[in-house]
Image (cartoon, helix red, strand yellow):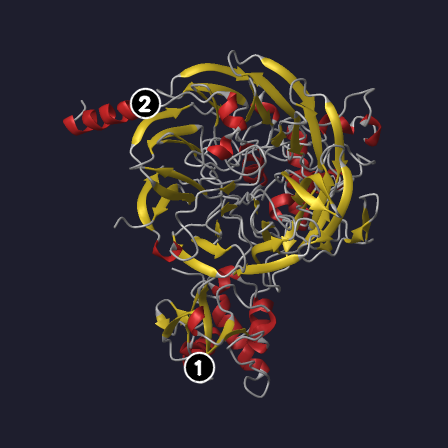
């Protein structure tokens, strides 16, 4: 039986929810024009993760104070970026759970749980989820058991659910869907289990699959020859982070994961397309427009799922449509996003596996850095120079803010045979314990790859960033600090310990004329704002 | 993939009612070779290429197998996994599991030779002239600057213990690194780094006092490449006393 108080809370929440307008695709296209909301995983289609909100700025950020905390009660850390639509916050959490919260108080409006299958062991990295996509009055979630579900944003009720693949074969989803026009786009996880990766688009209204792009070309298709024998059938190439979208070119950009088995390439001689690449897909058909491969025939598990940041910048005297990506392999890249042409690359962390990137965009590999049965040392380590943590780009400073990791490993290879649904890793790795690992945030000049400033964390970071027009970069570190840095100088302007490693990116929204900054730490979501006067 | 953090213990519970299985491949050299390959494919990720353990899984060669020692127990652990841990079940054909068991059996280190020293004298040295107890605790007695040694014999081999006494800095246990903080006025405090994060540091000095600093109030933090423990060379500790001390430590298996 509900107490009177519970009933009142639910009633109040419903009143807020019903005041919400639906989110048609025009609102997603113009997300930057409603900075009080946060409508996609990266804030808008460009992946810049920059908000024009400026109530919190360099001079007052030190006064930020806690507003509310939402605790999921799980033992699994959140990796979610919340969506906020007109006062309601939507988050997903571990174990196929999701919540709608009153963004003013953090009180729960509804909750959703999708039953976990009895046996779901084919997961490399936890039963996590990074967030919702939204269109109209529907929210879209890609589940750990490889389904895509549409929920009624007002109630959390299931509107449709579609099985993408069989989770028993190692397929899973952790990605926040990208909604483009009338389609819900998701990329699969499972690169350590010998899946053949794909990016799917589903009709938002019906849940029917509209297209599928296999991230490994099939027999007879161009690129299939970059895989020896049948290795393409179990070659990985997952796509587990959210891509970006250029409406003018109608192209979706998506980063592709490592080839499998991860650390042994003996069965898959060749470049292994489209692993460790960015692909540009026609948003309506899923047809490949171009690709660029960063790490051909990768044997270090250096997925290129990093978010491709889209910006139109002055480049060598003219404005160019750029795609900017700091890669797990330790190099920062700038590409022309109309055609995938390689423009520039520069290391942003210690790199020992390649002398540099050649004019054609291929790495100049240093022998003796690939995994071997006896072990070979390479930097960056398996976790990469960066990883799934979101970068951001501030149009005012012109700087890109990249979370980085200074950490190296010894990589061991082992001949491996594919077995359906089983780990297909091809070796192991270990941290050289005599070295001290660290990380931080670098401000990178996007056109050159030069580092303007860096802020050091005591440990390699796995938290993402948020840039704001208040001249701030928000982020979090592995010790659980949420930090605000000066966007121009990298100076620490505010920090507070939240007591658990931060494995998610911050976001910002506004309500009642008040700017909030929200970030997940551990299994809780924390919000901050300036004190009321 | 992101980071693989599959932490494996090899815990295991074999139901007592079950009839002990025997390894049909026992004694076959080709099974040992096959098992090594299979282990490298499926198990090395956590347990290391040569089953010597790593950050994610225990050493299966010299370590204590808390959850299984017999062939039948190992078979169960591998095929069924260990509930409540990150050791997963492995759906592989029985003969492949047996091959892995055969290989593990072949690399299993014989029990290290029992330490030859005089345990009682070792204990006297520990709490007396060698002054180990000034910094190390055994079953609640002793200092807390260095690692607690109540389980030293269960956790480390005798030759490792001997080496650590002769040359303390050879392998510093995580959490016991030496650090020096420098105050704005140049004053230095050296101790064991108990915790450090981006903005703060805590250390314990030789008198077991805990110091806590915000880094912004310090001039410098120096990470030292040495142990605070002195090297006990042969002048400080004779070979015979070393044997006695190791014999004592080797007998410590916790309570």
Kindly state the secondary structure of the residue where label 1 is placed. Answer: loop
Please give left or right for residue A233 compared with residue A126 in the image.
right
* Quadrant location, the N terminus of chain B: top right
Which chain does the numbered disc 1 sit on? Answer: B
Which residue does the numbered mark 1 point to in the structure image? Answer: B131
Residue A319, placed above or below residue A285: below
Which residue ends up furthest to the left in the rendered image?
A4
Which residue does the numbered mark 2 point to in the structure image? Answer: A19
Image spot of residue A24 (x, y percent): 48, 20
Badge 2: how crowded within 10 Å, few (<14), some, or many (20+)?
A: few
* Quadrant location, the C terminus of chain B: bottom left
**Residue at mark 1 to residue at mark 2: CA–CA distance:** 74 Å
Nearest the eye: A417 or A302: A302
Image spot of residue A466 (x, y percent): 50, 45
Kindly state the secondary structure of the residue where label 2 is placed. Answer: loop
Residue A215, placed above or below residue B209: above
The residue that appears at 58% across and 77% down in the rendered structure is: B166
Residue A106, placed above or below residue B208: above
């Amino acid at each position: 039986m509900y107490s009177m108080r519970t009933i009142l809370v639910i009633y109040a929440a419903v009143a807020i929810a019903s005041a919400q307008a639906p989110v048609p695709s025009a609102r997603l296209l113009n997300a930057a024009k409603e900075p009080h909301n946060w409508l996609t995983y990266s804030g808008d289609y460009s992946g810049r993760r920059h908000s024009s909100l400026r109530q919190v700025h360099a001079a007052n950020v030190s006064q930020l104070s806690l507003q509310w905390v939402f605790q999921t009660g799980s033992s699994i850390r959140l990796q979610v970026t919340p969506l906020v639509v007109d006062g309601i916050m939507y988050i997903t959490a571990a174990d196929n759970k999701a919540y709608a919260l009153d963004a003013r108080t953090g009180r729960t409006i509804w909750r959703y749980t999708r039953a976990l299958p009895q046996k779901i062991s084919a997961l490399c990295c936890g039963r996590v989820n990074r967030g919702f996509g939204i269109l109209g009055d529907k929210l879209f979630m890609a589940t750990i058991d490889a389904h895509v579900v549409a929920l009624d944003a007002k109630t959390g009720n299931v509107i449709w659910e579609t099985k993408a693949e069989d989770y028993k074969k190692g397929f899973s989803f952790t990605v926040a869907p990208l909604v483009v026009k009338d389609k819900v786009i998701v990329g699969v996880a499972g690169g350590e289990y010998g899946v053949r990766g794909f990016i799917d688009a589903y009709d938002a209204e019906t849940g029917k699959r509209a297209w599928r792009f296999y991230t490994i070309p099939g027999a007879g298709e161009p690129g299939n020859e970059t895989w020896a024998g049948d290795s393409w059938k179990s070659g990985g190439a997952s796509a587990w982070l959210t891509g970006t979208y250029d409406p003018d070119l109608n192209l979706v950009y998506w980063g592709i994961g490592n080839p499998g088995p991860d650390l042994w390439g003996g069965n898959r001689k060749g470049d292994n397309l489209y692993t460790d690449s960015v692909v540009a897909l026609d948003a309506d058909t899923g047809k490949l427009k171009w690709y660029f491969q960063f790490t051909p025939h990768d044997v270090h598990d250096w997925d290129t799922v990093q978010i491709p940041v889209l910006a139109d910048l002055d480049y060598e005297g003219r404005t160019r449509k750029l795609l900017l990506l700091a890669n797990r392999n330790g190099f920062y890249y700038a590409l022309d996003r109309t055609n995938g042409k390689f423009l520039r690359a520069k290391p942003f962390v210690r790199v020992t596996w390649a002398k540099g990137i050649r004019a054609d965009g291929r790495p100049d590999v240093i022998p003796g850095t690939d995994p071997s049965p006896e072990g070979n040392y390479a930097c960056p380590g398996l976790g990469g120079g960066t990883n799934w943590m979101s970068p951001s780009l501030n149009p005012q400073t012109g700087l890109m803010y990249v979370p980085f990791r200074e950490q190296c490993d010894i990589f061991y290879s082992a001949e491996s045979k594919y077995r359906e649904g089983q780990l297909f890793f091809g070796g192991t790795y270990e941290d050289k314990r005599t070295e001290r690992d660290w990380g931080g945030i670098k401000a990178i000049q996007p056109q050159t790859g030069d580092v303007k400033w860096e802020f050091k964390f005591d440990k390699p970071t796995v938290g993402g960033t948020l840039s704001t027009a208040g001249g701030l970069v928000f982020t979090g570190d592995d010790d659980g600090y949420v930090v605000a840095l000066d966007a121009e100088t990298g100076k620490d302007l505010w920090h507070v310990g939240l007591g658990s490693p931060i494995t998610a990116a911050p976001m910002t929204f506004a309500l009642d004329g008040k700017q909030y900054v929200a970030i997940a730490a551990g299994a809780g979501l924390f919000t901050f704002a300036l004190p009321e006067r | 993939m992101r980071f693989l953090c599959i932490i494996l213990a090899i815990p295991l519970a074999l139901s007592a009612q079950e009839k002990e299985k025997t390894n049909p491949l026992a004694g076959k050299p080709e099974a040992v070779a096959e098992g090594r390959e299979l282990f490298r494919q499926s198990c090395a990720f956590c347990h290391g290429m040569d089953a010597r353990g790593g950050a994610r899984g225990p050493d299966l060669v010299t370590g204590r197998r808390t959850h299984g020692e017999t062939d039948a127990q190992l078979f169960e652990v591998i095929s069924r996994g260990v509930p409540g841990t990150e050791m997963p079940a492995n759906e592989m054909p029985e003969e492949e599991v047996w091959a892995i068991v055969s290989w593990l059996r072949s690399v299993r280190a014989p029990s290290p030779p029992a330490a030859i020293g005089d345990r009682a004298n070792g204990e006297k040295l520990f709490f007396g002239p060698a002054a180990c107890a000034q910094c190390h605790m055994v079953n609640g007695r002793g200092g807390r600057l260095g690692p607690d040694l109540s389980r030293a014999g269960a956790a480390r081999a005798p030759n490792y213990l001997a080496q650590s006494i002769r040359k303390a800095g050879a392998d510093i246990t995580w959490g016991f690194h030496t650090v020096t903080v420098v105050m704005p006025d140049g004053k230095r405090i050296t101790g064991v780094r108990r915790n450090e994060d981006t903005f703060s540091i805590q250390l314990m000095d030789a008198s077991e006092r805990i110091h806590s600093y915000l880094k912004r109030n310090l001039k410098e933090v120096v990470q030292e490449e040495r142990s605070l423990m002195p090297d006990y060379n042969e002048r400080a500790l004779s070979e015979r006393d070393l044997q006695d001390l190791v014999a004592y430590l080797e007998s410590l298996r916790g309570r």
